[in-house]
Image (cartoon, rainbow, N blue to C red):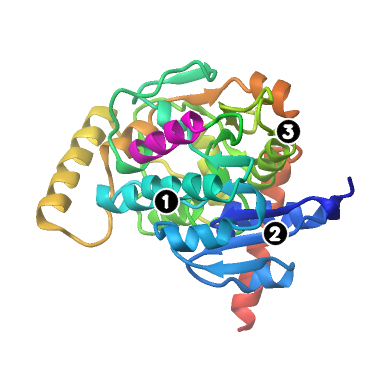
């Protein structure tokens, strides 16, 4: 079967950071790709992606998008460290329910779900853990809580007619990142970036192209009854790095000074809890500078055993951290040149 003979692929959230990378990779293989997103993205038009505008929480829009596809990459999600649980539930849980229902309705045989390692994060160090790690028994934020519900739903939906797999890429970064790096840079510029605790814990990250590759590999290997069906996989760089060393490398690329100030972990957690209470009670706009989830994330190790992904998906990162940093620096230089010339 040639590349062009294979069926159409749907990517929910196809205009987002990860979704657009998956789209580019699939289009480079000659696949017919459709995206479902709330807004239209000119960059997807440029690479020949069919676009349907709609909300993932709208079952009619999801059904329309899924119709005629033989593979669905469910990437769309509401991410973040703060916000109403109902908003996260609407996108992450109801949206996933709609995707599964549409796959059933239109007899789609393959569903690849983008999850998060935070579904197993307990607030303590996770060092070299594999997929046998249990789900956390409680969550400090709506994002991991709702992603865990959605992942369980997707994996429980695996059967003889619909094969499902869940990927858990950790801290995706690279040129075009509109989530992690902008937050780091904004806090640094405002003098509000602090080390949490007295450790420099090892963490895993995932360069964008590596995360997209894992999705494409999963789509190639997934089928009803296949070894990966009904399973979850950690995806990362396979190159754990000290957290604050990595943050300082990002800051250096952005022309910002390294982070030096530190706040004790217990104090940061207490401040996070207090800020959450204030923001929740007063219904303040924006997000707290610190939350309990963020304090624990920034003071613990979290890196993963990727043996299962290597074995079952054939996953090997193709872009190293060093190469990723070079690409990021080049991209940011180009952005500055464009902005200065505007």
Q: Nearer the viewer, residue 94 or 291?
A: 94
Task: Give the residue number, with chain letter if any, for mark 3.
Answer: 221
Tell me the quadrant of the picture where the N terminus can be found.
top right
What is the secondary structure assignment of the residue under circle 2? strand
Q: Earlier in the sequence, mark 2 or mark 1?
A: 2
Task: Give the residue number, with chain letter if any, for mark 1.
Answer: 95
Asked whether the viewer can see residue 298, the reply is no
Q: Nearer the viewer, residue 185 or 281?
A: 281
Q: Give me the C-alpha separation between circle 2 and circle 1.
A: 20 Å
Tag on residue 33?
A: 2
Q: Residue furthest right?
A: 2
Left or right relative to 196: residue 48: right
Q: Residue at x 50, y 55 (%)?
A: 256
Q: Residue at x 53, y 36 (%)?
A: 170
Q: Residue at x 66, y 41 (%)?
A: 215
Residue 147 belongs to magenta span: yes
Dot 1 alpha-carbon crowd within 10 angstroms: few under 14, some 14 to 19, many 20 or more: many
The magenta-colored residue range is 145-157
Dot 2 alpha-carbon crowd within 10 angstroms: few under 14, some 14 to 19, many 20 or more: many
Asked if 118 appears above or below 257 in the picture, the reply is above
Asked whether the viewer can see residue 100, the reply is yes
Q: Earlier in the sequence, mark 2 or mark 3?
A: 2
């Amino acid at each position: 079967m040639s590349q062009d003979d294979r069926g159409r692929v749907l990517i929910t959230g196809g205009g987002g950071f990860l979704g657009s990378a998956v789209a580019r990779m699939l289009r480079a293989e000659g696949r017919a790709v459709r995206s479902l997103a709330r807004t239209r993205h000119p960059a997807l038009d440029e690479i020949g992606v069919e676009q349907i505008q709609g909300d993932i929480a709208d079952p009619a829009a999801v059904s329309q998008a899924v119709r005629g596809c033989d593979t669905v990459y469910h990437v769309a999600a509401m991410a973040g460290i703060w916000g109403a649980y109902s908003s996260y539930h609407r996108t992450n849980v109801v949206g996933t329910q709609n995707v599964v229902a549409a796959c059933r309705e239109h007899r789609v045989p393959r569903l690849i779900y983008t999850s998060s390692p935070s579904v197993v994060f307990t607030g303590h160090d996770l060092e070299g853990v594999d997929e046998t790690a249990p789900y956390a028994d409680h969550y400090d934020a709506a994002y991991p809580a709702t992603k865990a519900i959605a992942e369980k739903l997707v994996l429980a939906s695996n059967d003889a007619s619909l094969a499902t797999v869940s990927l858990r890429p950790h801290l995706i970064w690279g040129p075009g990142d509109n989530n992690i790096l902008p937050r780091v840079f904004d806090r640094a510029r405002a003098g509000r970036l602090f080390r949490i605790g007295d450790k420099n814990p090892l963490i895993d990250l995932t360069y964008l192209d590596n995360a997209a590759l894992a999705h494409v590999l999963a789509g190639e290997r997934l089928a009803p009854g296949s070894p990966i069906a009904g399973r979850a996989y950690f995806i990362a760089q396979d190159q754990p790095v000290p957290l604050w060393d990595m943050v300082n490398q990002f800051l250096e690329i952005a022309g910002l000074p390294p982070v030096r100030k530190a706040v004790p972990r217990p104090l940061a957690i207490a401040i996070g809890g207090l800020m959450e209470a204030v923001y929740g009670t007063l219904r303040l706009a924006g997000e707290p500078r610190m939350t309990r989830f963020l304090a624990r994330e920034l003071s613990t190790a979290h890196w993963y055993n990727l043996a299962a992904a290597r074995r079952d998906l054939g996953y090997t990162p193709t872009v190293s951290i060093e190469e990723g940093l070079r690409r990021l620096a080049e991209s940011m230089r180009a952005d500055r040149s464009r902005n200065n010339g505007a």
